[in-house]
Image: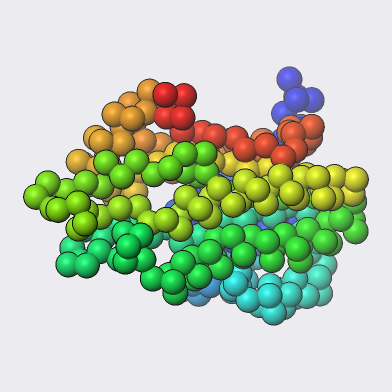
Amino acid sequence: MKEILNKFNLEGETALITGASGLLGVEHAKALLETGATVVLTDIDKINLSKVCSDLIRTFGEGSVVCKNMDVTNEKSIKTVASELAAENLNIGILINNAAIDPKVNKNSMIDTSRLENFLLDDWNFQLNVGLTGAMLCSKIFGSEMALQKKGVILNIASDLSIFAPDQRLYKQDGLEWSGQPVKPVTYSVIKHGLIGLTKYLSTYWSDRGVRCNALSPGGVLNGQNDEFIQKLSALIPMERMADNDEYRSAVQFLCSDASAYMNGQNIVMDGGRSAW
């Protein structure tokens, strides 16, 4: 049993997480810290990043957490962080591409810009830059170093919307005409589908250099949603509930460690069984 558990041990490894101050970014950090890794938290939001870092340092200790302000849409920003880490003798062996924009469904606008008919090109470009281009750039820069070291793991955080379309019935409002109904915007599902394509590409690109790449697709996570939405979504899930924010930690530990040493190019869907229906 101990030999099996040792495969989850990440002592001596350094992991970098993008979008680390977000709801799941914090949980990914805790998952890796629990298994002994040094974790580099990166985010464009300096204020939230500082708070998250302080909280994690109090729990896991000063030397286990490193914080870097980084814009995943800016290649220069990523390279600057990579150079700083190299100067600090921190070699990134695990990369979690977690940064994303999750646009909230707008129920109050007279002209709902979530609908495709009204969707702004600027919003499309911005959200794809963060969620998909950012993952490519970070994989390019940190993955290239992994390939030189002949060892590394890249984990892309996708979504259950990486395998099916948003169910717009979840957002339907009584009393509104079809043209005014709020919807989940086109970008989120497109980005998450794109991440699966990136995952498969990367899994074969550096496979001969010891670099693996997989994706994790979480289902809906409880985060202060209204009761009506929770009930609607729970009815679509065989387990009849949404996930708690800490329920993906063990999956992250598995996918980032030698416990999954022979897994490559896969998308692990954890959605309470929603995609089974």
Residue drawn at (60%, 72%), measured in percent from left and top? 73
Q: Tell how many labels.
A: 0
On screen, residue 154 above or below 99: above
| 50 is higher (above) or lower (below) than 224 | below
Q: x, y percentage for residue 33?
A: 63, 49
Front one among 252 and 90: 252
Q: Position of residue 192 (x, y in %)?
A: 53, 50
Q: Tell which residue pokes out farthest to the left in this image.
A: 175
Percent coordinates x, y for residue 243 in the rendering: 41, 37
Work out whether residue 147 can be spotted. yes
Apparent side of residue 224 relative to residue 255 in the rendered image (left or right): left
Residue 29 image point, x, y percent: 58, 52
| Residue in the foreground of this view, choosing between 177 and 7 | 177
Image quadrant holding the N terminus, namely: top right
Relative to residue 2, is residue 210 depicted above or below?
A: below
Residue drawn at the location 69% of the way across and 79% of the way down: 76
Residue 246 shown left or right of residue 180 in the figure: right
Residue 35 appears in view: no
- Which quadrant does the C terminus fall into? top left
User: Which colour style is shown?
Assistant: rainbow
Q: In terms of depth relative to the viewer, which is nearer, 16 or 205?
A: 205
Quarter location, residue 35: top right
Question: As drawn, is 8 to the left or to the right of 160?
Answer: right
Q: Residue at x 51, y 60 (%)?
A: 100
**What residue is drawn where x is 79% and y is 35%?**
261
